Each structure stands twice: as structure tokens, then as C-alpha cells.
Amino acid sequence: MPGSILVADDDEAMLDVYTRLFTGTDYLISKTSSFAEASRLINSGNYDLLITDLMLGDGLGTDLIKIFEKKRAGARSLLVSGSVAILPPEQIPDVYFEKPFKAEIFMAAVDKALA
């Protein structure tokens, strides 16, 4: 069964990048450009992976990750950011990607998270 992925990014160009990355894969993706909508989707849906930008217009991706982890034990998330340097070291996740990222490395991380 393909993995179900929620992507949250307030940059339309990045949402287009994700669309291109996942076209032709077996993954089912839902995309949103706001923290509020992503939070609603997390609470009403059943996603296997959350991919979120750090800085959304109406909230932080790290807070979305917390919501996702609360809803689903063992939840997998990937944080994407222009820079994680603004975060305190204890808030930087083990797996994150700084923009721009290499598509092959990113998709390998997605595959690993959903394996």
C-alpha cells in the first residue's frame, strides 16, 4: 500500500516542486500552504509522513510535528527550511533538509521514512 504524505509549505513554488517530485510515485500526497489547514488535516486524516517547512505564515513546522506525533505514535516527519540556524539546538530534528535540497537525497529519506 502506498504511503500517505501531508506536505505543508507556504511557498507555492515549493508546493510545485513537491508535486513534481511525487508525480509517478505510488505515494499519495495532500498539500497545504497554512499551519491551520495542516493541523486540521492531521487531526482529521491518517497520514504516514509529514513534510513541513519550518516557517509557515501562520505557525511553525516544529509545532506541526508535535501535533502529528501526538496524534500518531511513531510518526515520521521531515522538516525543510531555508535555515534551521534560527532554532535552538534541542529543537533541530535528526532529519531535516535545508533549501535547496537534492531531490535524490530527499526522496531517499522519504522512502526510508515510509519503509
Image (cartoon, rainbow, N blue to C red):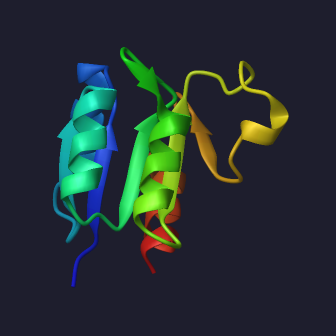
Position above or below: 75 against 99: below
Q: Residue at x 28, y 39 (%)?
A: 38
Left or right of residue 77: residue 85: right
Position above or below: 7 against 4: above
Q: Residue at x 42, y 73 (%)?
A: 114
Whether residue 93 is visible: yes
The image shows residue 84 at horizontal and vertical percentages of 68, 27
The image shows residue 78 at horizontal and vertical percentages of 51, 50
Q: Between residue 23 and residue 58, name the one nearer to us.
A: 58
The image shows residue 58 at horizontal and vertical percentages of 36, 17
Q: Between residue 26 and residue 66, name the one nearer to us.
A: 66
Q: Residue at x 31, y 41 (%)?
A: 39
Left or right of residue 83: residue 107: left
Q: Between residue 99 and residue 46, name the one nearer to us.
A: 46
Position above or below: 49 against 3: above
Q: Residue furthest right?
A: 89
- Number of callouts in the render? 0
Q: Residue furthest bottom?
A: 1
In the picture, which quadrant includes the C terminus?
Answer: bottom left
